[in-house]
Image (cartoon, rainbow, N blue to C red):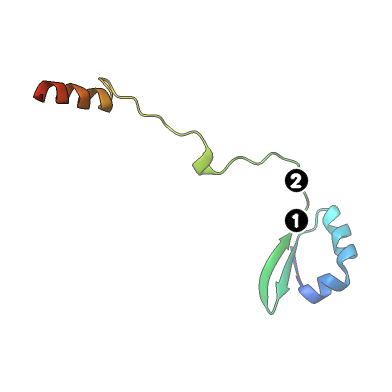
Amino acid sequence: MKAITFTDFRKKASGFINQVEYGETFIIVRHGKPVAEIIPFSDNTAMPPAWKQKGIQLQLQGSDLSSAILEDREANA
């Protein structure tokens, strides 16, 4: 992984992109701070974020909450 300045990247973008095609990775630095990473394209299908993945579903024995509330209302009416 190589760090290059934004100005240098702008001047020599074509050459850097050619290097990326061969597997090189670059960090673009502007004013001394990293602002972007250029990596080779990967055709692997990305996994969805953890919050979108199917999680554990809890199952409880007994009636559901709405049925319990209706039964309680009828009993107290």
**Mark 2 and mark 1 residues within 8 Å of each other at the beta carbon:** yes
24 vs 52: above or below: below
Query: What SS does tag 2 mark?
Result: loop
Q: Quadrant of the N terminus?
A: bottom right
User: Is residue 17 toward the left or the right of residue 37 in the image?
Assistant: right
Q: Position of residue 74 (x, y in %)?
A: 15, 21
Reading the image, the residue beneath label 1 is 39
Reading the image, the residue beneath label 2 is 42
69 vs 33: above or below: above
Residue at 26 percent of width and 20 percent of height? 63
User: Identity of the amino acid at label 2?
Assistant: Ser
Query: What SS does tag 1 mark?
Result: loop
20 vs 74: above or below: below
9 vs 70: above or below: below
Residue at 85 percent of width and 60 percent of height? 17
Q: Position of residue 14 (x, y in %)?
A: 90, 63
Q: Quadrant of residue 11?
A: bottom right
User: Identity of the amino acid at label 1?
Assistant: Ile
User: Outermost residue, left direction?
Assistant: 76
Q: Quadrant of residue 67?
A: top left
Mark 2: give few (<14), some (14-19) or many (20+) Cα within 10 Å.
few
Q: Quadrant of residue 70?
A: top left
Q: Which mark is residue 60?
A: none
